Each structure stands twice: as C-alpha cells, then as structure tokens.
Image: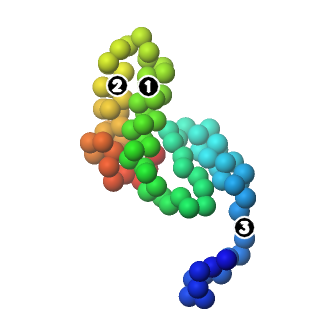
Amino acid sequence: MRPTKKHMAVTEYVHPDVFEKWRLRALEMGFLYCASGPLVRSSYKAGEALIENVLRKRASVNTSAGGGAVAGAEAEAESATGTKGGAGTEVL
C-alpha cells in the first residue's frame, strides 16, 4: 500500500525470495557484498559492508598470514573505495 495518493502506486509485490536470488547472483558475479531487500537503497551501509566483507574474506583465506591479512584487506578496501574506511562508496 502506498502511504498517500502523492506516492507512486504499487504495481507489484516482490517476494523476499526474489531479492535473495539477486543477492546470490551478485555474489556469483564476484561482488564482495550485496544487500538485497525491499528497503535497501544503493548506498545501504555500503562502506561498512565493504570493509567487513573484505576483512572477513581475507582473514579466512590468509589465516596463516597473521596481521598482514588485515592490513592488506584494509589497503584493498581503501583502494576499491578511494577513501579510508570505505565511507561514501556505493560500489561494492
């Protein structure tokens, strides 16, 4: 239901399974992270998600590398976003 008549009419209900399908497709394509849901916008927690997922993936791959894996992941995230900490990015 739309909140008021000034808002666009709802033309289709998209089931949560469809959002999950698109999330999985994005991951298959190589995206580091995908937030997919009815209330998600393009910048939805983008910076935080990028850093968290880069760090998690690096740590799981390079568990024997010690602290170097974290430093490398942070540098990779900064490079990918063009900013320290990933703030302001919408591309994951």
The amino acid type, in three-letter code, at marker 1 is Arg
Quarter of the image with the N terminus is bottom right
The 10 Å Cα crowd at callout 3, few under 14, some 14 to 19, many 20 or more, is: few
Query: Of the numbered discs in the image, which one, if any, rests on residue 70?
Result: 2
Is the Cβ of the residue at disc 2 closer than 8 Å to that at disc 1?
yes
Q: Position of residue 45 (x, y in %)?
A: 43, 51
The residue at the far left in this view is 84
The residue at the far top in this view is 64
Q: Residue at x 48, y 28 (%)?
A: 57
User: Label 2, label 1: how many angstroms apart (C-alpha)?
Assistant: 7 Å
Tell me the quarter of the picture where residue 74 sits.
top left
Query: Of the numbered discs in the image, which one, if any, rests on residue 58?
Result: 1
Q: Residue under circle 3?
A: 13
User: Label 1, label 3: how many angstroms apart (C-alpha)?
Assistant: 37 Å
Left/right placement of residue 87 relative to residue 25 reads left
Question: Could you say whether the residue bearing mark 1 is in a helix, strand or loop?
Answer: helix
Left/right placement of residue 8 relative to residue 53 reads right
The amino acid type, in three-letter code, at marker 3 is Tyr
Q: Is residue 69 above or below residue 26?
A: above
Q: Residue at x 39, y 38 (%)?
A: 51
Of pointers 3 and 2, the one earlier in the residue sequence: 3
User: Label 3, label 2: how many angstroms apart (C-alpha)?
Assistant: 41 Å
Q: Residue at x 71, y 62 (%)?
A: 14
